[in-house]
Image (tube, rainbow, N blue to C red):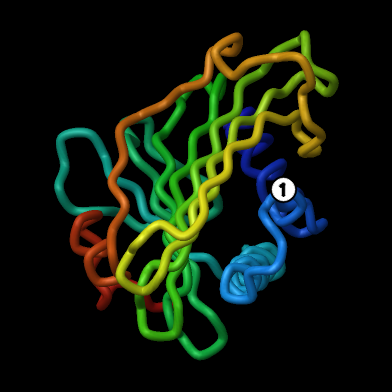
Amino acid sequence: MKALSFFITIALFAVFCGWSEAQVLPQGNVFLKSLQKEKSRTDQYEFKHRVQLIVLAKLEGRQQLVRIKNDNFPDNTDIIYTVVKDSTGRIVAVEQVPYSESGDWYEEFKHYFDAKGNTFAFTIKTTVFDDSVKGGVAMWQSFNYYTSALNLLNHTITLTDSKEKPIKGRKSTEFDFRHDPYHIYKSVDDCLKACQIDRSTLKY
């Protein structure tokens, strides 16, 4: 659990400090920039209000999710879901994290939703410990932005260390990154349904 918490802290610290894919995305696209800013606002809000996040766990052999407090995950945890709600109670993001009991790796799939509940961004973050990288952690990230109809607007992949500094002269295939299958959902309702998250259980 300490290793898992370490990876989660890296992810949250990075978005809070403003390290983002904005530096490598093409300039001049006003709509794309607005989506970038919305994602950044959501990430920073999540970081500042992380004690208020709703954390659920899917346990092996059980269909119903359980509410998690203080990072006390049962041994048979399979997947961790984190629901981010803004100050009005609107769901702005849902994270899906396959559970690593050993903590040797971290993988995160994250949907971002606009004011109408449509998915406007989807990101993948996967990290591993690697002594050949400064800081001992390699990070592979995929950033995807969409129109309201889930048509892909922009796609970027980065390979960095834990501080999101590019790992130069290396390929992602040189690292033992975990790449689980995933699905991108069109809306918050579709995402909640697929994850079997009941809205009525998402109260603080």
Would residue 103 be found to the left or right of residue 196 on screen? Answer: right
Q: Is residue 79 above or below residue 129?
A: below
Instruction: Tell me the amino acid under the disc marked 1.
Output: Val
**Residue 46 shows in this picture:** no
Q: Is residue 75 above or below residue 26?
A: above
Would residue 176 be found to the left or right of residue 181 on screen? Answer: right
Q: Quadrant of the N terminus?
A: top right
Query: Residue at position x 83%, y 23% from top?
Result: 135
Whole-percent x and y of residue 13? 75, 50
| Nearer-the-camera pick, 159 or 42 | 159
Indicate the quadrant where residue 194 lies. Answer: bottom left
Which residue ends up furthest to the bottom in the rendered image?
88
| Nearer-the-camera pick, 144 or 117 | 144
**Residue 91 shows in this picture:** yes
Q: Is residue 54 above or below residue 136?
A: below
Indicate the quadrant where residue 82 lies. Answer: bottom left
Q: Which residue is mark 1?
A: 24
Whole-percent x and y of residue 120? 44, 67
